[in-house]
Image: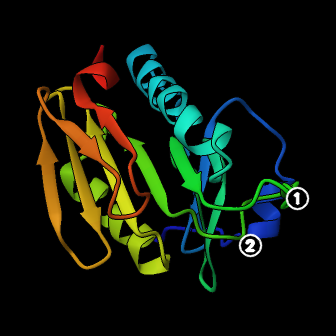
Amino acid sequence: MAVNVTTMSVEDLLAMTDNGMRHELVRGELIETMPVNEEHGEIAATIAALLRGPIKLAGRGRVGVETGVIISRHPPTVLGPDVSITLVGSDEPRSQGFLERMPEIVFEVVSPSDSADEVHDKSWLYLDAGVQMVVAVWPKRAVITIMMADGVTRTFGMSEELDLSPVIEGVTLSVAEIFA
């Protein structure tokens, strides 16, 4: 049986009408997912709130929530990390479209429907595009895994501090506080 896959461009995705679903574009293929559950949303909001002071308010960059990031134009790929940190000057204008500049760190809260392979593959899409650190938050296991561009991976448990210093000096987050 033949399968029809509609190839979209970054501009096609940006021009789409909001239908209440979440959309990402992976190698030209539109991926549509359900809105996140309450736990997922609260964890992402907590991470963004914890980062706001040390990043945005200190003038070190911007914290984004579900901001579309152009990973590639050829093939067209746009991902929307749950939380992202982009180190830019406070005077740099905000984009009215998807983010063209690669964030330094992205956070993905893993949904119950996400497989470990999907999370791994998505992490490498980010890293191959220039993201320096991918942080996968696993609510079901109450652990956080970071992947660095050089392939180094580390897992943090509830009693540990998530250290973002390899990318942003002096910024740590309590794993327990993220899951509180």
Location of residue 102 in the rendering, given as x and y in whole percent from the top left corner: 59, 69
Q: Is residue 47 left or right of residue 49?
A: left
Q: Where's the C terminus, which quadrant? A: top left
- For the rendered model, the colour scheme is rainbow
Task: State the SS at label 1.
Answer: loop
Q: Is residue 67 above or below residue 121?
A: above
- Residue 139, by quadrant, is top left
Q: What residue is shown with label 1?
A: 93
- Residue 148, by quadrant, is bottom left
Binning the other alpha carbons within 10 Å of mark 1 as few (below 14), some (14 to 19) or many (20 upward) gives few
Task: Name the residue nearer the viewer: 3 or 57.
Answer: 57
Hey, what amino acid is under mark 1? Pro
- Picture residue at 81% right of the left edge, 64% below the top: 12
Q: Where's the N terminus, which quadrant? A: bottom left
Which mark is nearer the camera, 1 or 2?
A: 1
Q: Is residue 84 above or below residue 137?
A: below
The circle drawn on residue 9 is 2
Hey, what amino acid is under mark 2? Ser
Q: Is residue 151 above or below residue 39?
A: below
Location of residue 146 in the rendering, given as x and y in whole percent from the top left corner: 25, 55
